[in-house]
């Protein structure tokens, strides 16, 4: 196992980078602690796979250092880092049996056969591959092939970390949950450092104890699934985490009031003072759909809204509405009263978040 440290790390595919836009990975410092189960979460193109390939040694960073247990490994090839990497598409030998595929990494290290057999059978049992050990890999289903690919990483005792690059993309949706749980069980059993790259927040939160959210080549927040939901540190995290994501309003402070365009918002004094003190032209208030209450008649501190549609999703309903010509979402509990075309919304003061230049700022309470 290894503690993986990224120190002043940056990478550009351009020979002469001159601006932030030239970097796939913008300068970052980050630590993956030994034995942790981590997810690297973000949209396509944010730099997730580039970062994973730098950690594994498939790519050398343009700037900064990669440290394994405090030792710089920038120039070390993957085979000398004791890293196992599981890719989006299974990497196995179709002409070999499942047994021989699992045994291959051990045999490649000249492991005695009497040690190979019990290890192969242990991993096969964990991954429910025992009935398939004598079958040729070319005859396996996509999910079975991916389990063999995972097993090839797990079979070695000397692995420092296992890196998963969107490993369930080609798996049938009905089997994804089962495989995610299997990976979680494997981590708990072997306590190996695992980093799981995905664009799917459900995959990330099911697998990982902590999630690093990437946006525009940077880790903008690192925390537990609960922390990412309850206290997103960046507007992108608020938007990306949650179903649906956080609602945002660009606001200003004028004549003692917080203004959303030409509409004064009925916020408390703490929010008003914090907006006034922000000192930026890029100020946003954010609130999750779960913390908006909607009624047909005016309530204290409510604002009038225009209903767009209401989707009944069984255990809750999702209301789309406009305020000041901007679309918002509210999550209404099961059994909520029917809402007419014109209604009123209240934004819970205690759940309003303030963002200045896209980053979370604490609201001062005096």
Image (tube, grey):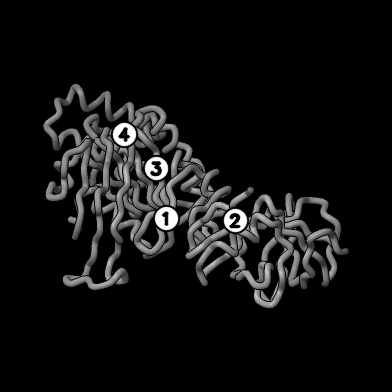
Q: Earlier in the sequence, mark 1 or mark 3?
A: 3
Q: Are marks 4 and 1 in contact (CB under 8 Å)?
A: no
Q: Are marks 1 and 3 in contact (CB under 8 Å)?
A: no
- Give the number of the mark in front: 1 or 3: 1
Picture quadrant of residue 105: top left
Picture quadrant of residue 341: bottom right
Secondary structure at numbered mark 2: strand
| Residue 211 vertical placement versus 155 (above, below) | below
Residue matched to label 2: 353
Residue matched to label 1: 220
Label placed on residue 38? 3
Q: Residues within 10 Å of mark 4 (few under 14, many from 20)?
A: some
The residue that appears at 16% across and 45% down in the rendered structure is: 73
Q: Where in the figure is residue 92, as x and y percent of width and height?
A: 27, 47
Is residue 170 something one can see in this rendering? no
Q: Residues within 10 Å of mark 1 (few under 14, many from 20)?
A: some
Label 3, label 2: how far apart the Cα atoms are: 26 Å
Q: Earlier in the sequence, mark 3 or mark 2?
A: 3
Residue matched to label 4: 34
């Amino acid at each position: 196992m290894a503690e993986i440290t990224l120190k002043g790390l940056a990478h550009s595919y351009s020979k002469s980078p001159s601006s932030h836009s030239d970097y796939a990975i913008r300068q970052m410092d980050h630590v993956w602690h030994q034995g942790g189960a981590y997810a690297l979460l973000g949209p396509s193109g944010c730099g997730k796979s580039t970062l994973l390939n730098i950690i594994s040694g498939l790519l050398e960073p343009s700037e900064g250092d990669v440290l394994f247990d405090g030792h710089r490994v920038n120039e070390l090839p993957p085979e000398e880092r004791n890293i196992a990497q599981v890719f989006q598409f299974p990497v196995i030998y179709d002409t070999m049996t499942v047994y021989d595929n699992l045994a291959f990494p051990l045999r490649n290290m000249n492991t005695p056969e009497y040690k190979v057999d019990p290890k192969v059978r242990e991993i096969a049992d964990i991954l429910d591959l025992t009935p398939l050990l004598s079958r040729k890999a070319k005859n396996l289903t996509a999910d079975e092939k991916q389990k063999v690919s995972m097993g090839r990483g797990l079979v070695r005792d000397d692995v420092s970390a296992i890196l998963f690059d969107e490993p369930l993309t080609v798996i049938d949706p009905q089997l994804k949950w089962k495989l995610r749980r299997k990976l979680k069980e494997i981590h708990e059993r072997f306590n190996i450092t695992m980093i799981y790259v995905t664009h799917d927040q459900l995959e990330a939160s099911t697998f990982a104890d902590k999630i690093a959210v990437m946006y525009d080549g940077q880790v903008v927040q690192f925390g537990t699934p609960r922390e990412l939901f309850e206290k997103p540190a960046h507007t992108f995290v608020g938007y990306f985490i949650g179903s649906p994501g956080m609602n945002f309003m660009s606001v200003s402070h004028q004549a003692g009031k917080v203004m959303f365009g030409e509409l004064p918002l009925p916020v408390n004094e703490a929010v008003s003072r914090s907006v006034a003190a922000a000192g930026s032209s890029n100020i946003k208030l954010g609130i999750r759909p779960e913390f908006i209450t909607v009624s047909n008649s005016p309530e204290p501190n409510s604002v009038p809204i225009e209903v767009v549609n209401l989707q009944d999703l069984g255990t809750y309903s999702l209301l789309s509405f406009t305020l000041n010509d901007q679309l918002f979402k509210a999550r209404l509990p099961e059994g909520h009263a029917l809402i007419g075309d014109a209604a009123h919304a209240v934004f819970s003061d205690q759940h309003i978040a303030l963002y200045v230049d896209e980053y979370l700022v604490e609201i001062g309470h005096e």
